[in-house]
Amino acid sequence: MVEWLPLILFVCVCLVLMAGFPVAFSLAGTSLLFAGFGVLTDTLDSAFLSALPNRLFGILSNQILTAVPLFIFMGVMLEKSRVAEQLLRNMGFLYGSLRGGLGLSVILVGALMAASTGIIGATVVTMGLISLPTMLKNGYSPSLATGTICATGTLGQIIPPSTALIILGDVLSSAYQQAQLNMGIFAPDTISVADLFLGAVIPGAILVTAYLAYIILIALFKGESAPAVQDRPPFSWAFFGRLVVSLVPPMVLVFMVLGAIFTGIATPTEAAGIGALGATLLAIGYGEFDLKRLKEVMDSTLQVTSMVFLIFIGAALFSLVFRGFGGEELVHSAFTDMPGGVFGAMLMVMVVIFLLGFILDFIEITLVVVPIIAPVLLSMGVDPVWLGIMIALNLQTSFLTPPFGFALFYLRGVTPPDIKTQTLYKGVIPFIVIQLLVLMALAAFPEMATYLPDQIYG
């Protein structure tokens, strides 16, 4: 019975979360209850709990995690300053004379917003409010419109600078060092958030290209589902000027942030500061900045950041109790005894993470599940960058998949009542197929994730 306590703890945490309790308090509260039981029954060494203050100090003083609130501020500022709205309108006019042109514009603008925001819920809701009425007004099939917006919104999971990749990179960095120490390597290699950002570039680009190709195919063979925009104004130099003003500044901002990280000019935290300042200057330049909007942005940033760091604290306590009950040894023995070796272990992990994506957000999975499974997989020789991108793509697919996908719930909240939930499900299925094909390609060719980090950072 005692050896199964780690698994019972994990199942109880999932059940409490499914009951609707706040994530951070569910993790901490359930772990404390099990810790109390363990101390009273002498199945848990109380020394594990004494390590909690050092863990919390490490979280709050982690320089990498300082990038999280700064990138959140950047994304919220771009959302509140209506940059995406102006960009989508002008891009729609540019491609609108073509069948499927508006759909192509939604994907391109959504990819840019995903790179800026990095938060799935914010991107899906924003794109739903901005683009869905326009697409329906211009005669787009409701299933195609909702599917395109849902799929585009989840790109924030994989396109850098993604908040998900920052948190995942920090967790994998610790897991990679722990795995090497367990293997007797006392001068361990390291990976960074920049490695993960670079690793996501090729899979992210392939994904966006595949989305665009799907819209083009629909426009060619089923044109009535993606008609041309009817009220497109005639092309003029004034329109061209508006397009340049709306398109170039946000693209320059994203490229500046990523360029500073990839070239090593700035750390991810410093680059996040550049992004936050740049987004504020963009809002001022667009005439959408005032003290009221600044207060809204700061309030939203504070709420999201508080939620993230509370989950960090709850996950730290869960991790200590899980290890105290011998959970790490249980996972290691389960993986090493599994048929198929590394392939079998990876397959099981991907299936479990995919299913957990129905009930847990990426932050909970990254902070609760990844620290459990990553050290074991990395000890078996799995590349840390490839593992991180596989997890990110897997979760992105899970968030799209009916009936529990988070992106579907987010979009359902801003969709007109006359559009049925089944229409949303129908619309995302082709994009799920695309996601699975890219995921299988990445599994077969890890170089898709590892090539750029190897070439640039060696």
Image: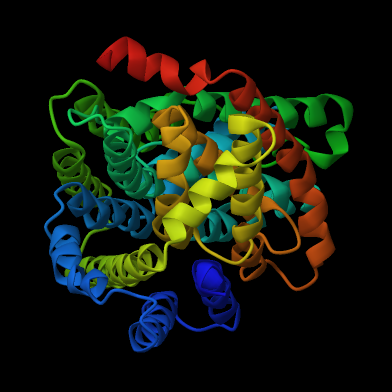
Q: Nearer the viewer, residue 197 or 178?
A: 178
| Residue 233 vs residue 112, the one in the foreground | 112
Residue 297 screen position, x and y as percent: 27, 65
Relative image position of residue 127 (x, y in whole percent): 54, 53
Residue under the point 36% across and 25% down: 198
Q: Residue furthest top?
A: 455
| Residue 157 sits above or below residue 43 on the image | above
Q: Position of residue 237 (x, y in %)?
A: 42, 24
- Quarter of the image for the C terminus: give it: top left
Query: In this image, 101 relative to 389: left or right?
Result: right
Between residue 303 and residue 290, name the one nearer to us. 303
Task: Give above or below for 100 relative to 288.
Answer: above
Q: Position of residue 163 (x, y in %)?
A: 36, 49
The answer to whether residue 186 is above or below residue 20 is above
- The answer to whether any part of residue 86 appears in the image is no
Left or right of residue 3: residue 359: right
Counting the numbered discs, the total is: 0
Q: Image point 40% across, 32% down: which residue?
A: 384
* Residue in the image at 21% along x and 39% along y: 268
Vertical arrangement, residue 373 with respect to residue 451, above or below: below
Q: Is residue 219 visible?
A: yes
Residue at 48%, 38% (x, y): give it.
Answer: 377
Q: Quadrant of residue 374?
A: top left
Asked which colour scheme the image uses, the reply is rainbow
Is the N terminus in the top left, top right, bottom left or bottom right quadrant? bottom right
